[in-house]
Amino acid sequence: MSVNSLYPSAELSSIGLSWRASGQATLRGPLLRLAQSCDRAFVRLSGLWKAEEEHHPASMPAQALQRADYLRSFPHQAAFAARLGPEDANLRAFLDGPVLDPDGSVRLTGLSPVSEVLTPAACYHVYDDRQGQELAGPQYVTTRNTCFRHEREYVPLRRLSSFRMREVVCLGRAEDTAAFLRSAVTAVDAFCERVGVGLEWRAATDPFFRPRDNPRYLLQRVDPVKSEATYGGDLAIASVNRHHDHFGESFGLTLDGAPAHSACLAFGIERWLFALVDRHGTDPAAWPDVERAAAEVLAALAGGPA
Amino acid sequence: MSVNSLYPSAELSSIGLSWRASGQATLRGPLLRLAQSCDRAFVRLSGLWKAEEEHHPASMPAQALQRADYLRSFPHQAAFAARLGPEDANLRAFLDGPVLDPDGSVRLTGLSPVSEVLTPAACYHVYDDRQGQELAGPQYVTTRNTCFRHEREYVPLRRLSSFRMREVVCLGRAEDTAAFLRSAVTAVDAFCERVGVGLEWRAATDPFFRPRDNPRYLLQRVDPVKSEATYGGDLAIASVNRHHDHFGESFGLTLDGAPAHSACLAFGIERWLFALVDRHGTDPAAWPDVERAAAEVLAALAGGPA
């Protein structure tokens, strides 16, 4: 079946998707079980590096995120947690109003100072949580988070305003991150072959605001640091990212007295659902056993570069 | 050990808690594994009602939530997803400013209309997702979500600004919800006995804003609809809630041509971590096998009221 056969998403709803035009997905039944299996499969793959799992909140202080200059690079994508000012008069003023405007937007009164950003990518928490630490050696971490991004348009299972991302992060020396990324690409290729999802690796850049004004974008152009595993020609279902010592510098993470290097492997869980269903159809009986595939990859590569 | 022995949270950090004063917890190691086991245990318990699992986004349209009059009842607790207006001039103005104020709050420029509320409780999505449906019979659903609440103060594992809630929801006739709540209390009691966590059930009310002005609060006072399983005298680790046909009316859910009734059983996952560690100590070897306990409860009660 082709990508287009999934639009409108009637076929997807028959296997458990409820979709909102505002970019949110509810999953149940076959699609939910597939999403859970995919995440367990990715956690298994992280065993290649004996990654330790951690769970982070769904928001982080803007001040922490700003250490990596996130808000200057991606102001158009950031989502903030905003709350009404707690003063009784302010809340009464809110209640005295219509609360909602006819278009469904909230008729806000005064907001409390906004200091939290909704998690834009799972791995930021990993660096922030280790802020100022001196690492004894390379560290491998896996974490999943609900991520929020403001986009111009949303597409079922392809582009969501809130979605789940599973990442594997390597913190270490330049050579540790290089070896990690090599083995990550090998693992993703082996996994995709086993689950019958063809993909193509493409050099990519992060979606900076006004990229040409951003030195980090220009750097990424001359020295590609992001490579996306794309399905169907245009859907990035995984990516590998080399951060050099950008996060080590930003969060004061050191190793051998120098800023630590970092790299990550990221999986967009809903996008994997899209790719697997697009490739194998809407009959769950025809879906591959993604967890077994991950276990096989682990067995095949565990002696490898990791 | 006593509740107080967990403060300051040095003992908790030794088993995997990183805590932020702004009310967020990072979990790793023993505490993360315990959280995962607790959630699997609660899902097992939901097997008592053969509940179907579903996964919902971490936010919902304010318009949907307002069907249940949430914003008028809990304006002080609501958290909204806010984004900068996408106009180039607005984003440039943001970037021309300091981005952050010295206190760490974001120097916002114009916001896009705010129409999403961050999930305040897992079960709202269940009603909204079925909006306007005529049920063929009782339905039992379990779902977990990241919930956001604005509080005056935050306490490690006891009161968080974002936390995870696992719920089991019953939609049906008044007698279905009554039977569900009876069996829910029996199941929680049996589970707590097996995991060695003593609790006390207490009638409670929802934390309405200016409760005495709110007819729903007054109703809850004369006809208690919420009962909390409290640990250590003051920590609600679970609750059972009878909504009568409030959500059925609000979301147009009908059964036998009348508004459906609903009820829910809710578990606050981080609070269970607190109770289990407070009760059994910080040595994971001394922790109960919560998943086995749930399986035993299921075996013991499966023939029962559910």
Image (spheres, coloured by chain):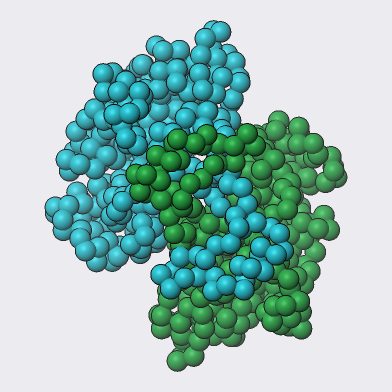
Chain colours: A cyan, B green
The N terminus of chain A lies in quadrant: bottom left
Residue A127 location (% of width, % of height): 52, 28
Q: Is residue B113 above or below residue A66?
A: below
When asked about the image quadrant of residue A189, the answer is top left
Q: Residue at x 76, y 83 (%)?
A: B222
Residue occupying the far top of the picture: A256
Q: Nearer the viewer, residue A34 or B16?
A: B16
Residue B214 vs residue A102: left or right? right
Residue occupying the far bottom of the picture: B257
Q: Residue at x 30, y 45 (%)?
A: A272
Q: Is residue A42 above or below residue B248?
A: above
Residue B213 location (% of width, % of height): 72, 77
When asked about the image quadrant of residue A191, the answer is top left
| Residue B104 appears in view | yes
Residue B10 location (% of width, % of height): 76, 32
Q: Is residue B111 above or below residue A116?
A: below
Q: Nearer the viewer, residue B89 or A274?
A: B89
The C terminus of chain A lies in quadrant: top left
| Residue A123 appears in view | no
Q: Is residue B64 above or below residue A76?
A: below
When asked about the image quadrant of residue B33, the answer is top right
